[in-house]
Image (tube, rainbow, N blue to C red):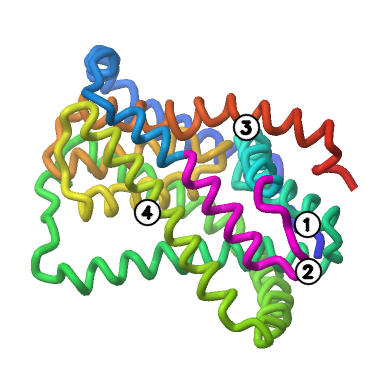
Amino acid sequence: MAEPTSRFKPRSRNLLLLALLVIGLYVVVPQIGDFRSSLHLLTRPRGGWPALAVGLTAATYLSAAATYCLLAFKPLKYARTVLVQLAAMFVNRLLPGGIGALGSNFVYLRREGHNSTQAGSMVAINNLLGFAGHSLLLLIILLAYSGHLPAARHMQGRSGFWAGVGIALLAAVLLVLLIRPARQRVTTWGTEVGRQLSTYRQRPWRLPAALLSSMTLTLANVGCLAACAEALGVHLSFLTIFLVFSLGISAGTATPTPGGLGGFEAGLVAGMVAYDVNSAAALAVALLYRLISYWLALLAGGIAFIVCQRRGLLTL
């Protein structure tokens, strides 16, 4: 199943870029002073928290590889799949909206003996499990802590409020631009995924196991953010960190940049500011998290990509 691509008309693309520029200027420029303070905070991380954050980031790739091995219709070598996940992340950082990771995993699965329909469906099911796992964790948290959820005290503050407004506007623009082609894609995707899901009836344990693996990936990401917060003296409950991370994911997904750059950070900062973290500290936590989970991982991913290319793992 080939991955469909969407193309913006030049005028629509220009309007989108203009909206992004306006939002970025309005939200970021007033925070230049906070940015300087944030850089100062980053020079003084506490204890072994950064090392823990690095370890948890590595765990996300182990979980991602485990999910694909569980979903595979043909046996996959785990160590090789971990390497491919790192390489796919590297490609994903160069292309917006996860296109790079989707394409890399598709090619890898095809090389390992899956046909186009199986490979495309596995990539789609993996993404579906990621969304379902995150949503299930959020639902569990909301049910378990109903009545004890932390209240956002400063959502009306200038930074958090306008960052949220900017993200909402961006999401609205994307929705308007993509709604028509999305209908056909969702219908086709749903049909193919439904067919492939039925094939797991003979191995019913694999889907729940893959879901648990995907949930582990989410928890490792949240744990990494929590470790970054502790490293910089920001003390928030794991529940609050999970909610902040969810906001960052939503903002990053709505931002058509490689890895959600800009939108993800804005979502994290807005979420932490809403929970009474000063803007300089919130920005420092977001920067440290991205330094570890994005830029440091990018170096490892680049090496993995070169190795995969030499071994022919990403070529058919």
- The mark nearer the N terminus, 1 or 2, is 1
304 vs 107: above or below: above
Give the distance between the C-alpha atoms of the residues marked 4 and 2, in whole angstroms.
28 Å
Q: Which residue is mark 2?
A: 118
| Tag 1–tag 2 contact (CB < 8 Å) | yes
SS for dot 3: helix
Q: Position of residue 14 (x, y in %)?
A: 61, 36
Left or right of 302, for residue 207: left
Q: Was residue 59 drawn as part of the magenta stretch in this picture?
A: yes
Q: Amino acid at mark 4?
A: Leu
Instruction: Give the camera-side residue of 39 and 57.
Output: 57
- The mark nearer the N terminus, 3 or 2, is 2
Instruction: Give the camera-side residue of 142 and 73.
Output: 73
- The tag on residue 109 is 1
Q: Position of residue 191 (x, y in %)?
A: 71, 79
SS for dot 1: helix
Q: Position of residue 235 (x, y in %)?
A: 14, 38
Part of the protein shown in magenta: 58-79
Left or right of 311, for residue 201: left
Q: Residue at x 77, y 63 (%)?
A: 119
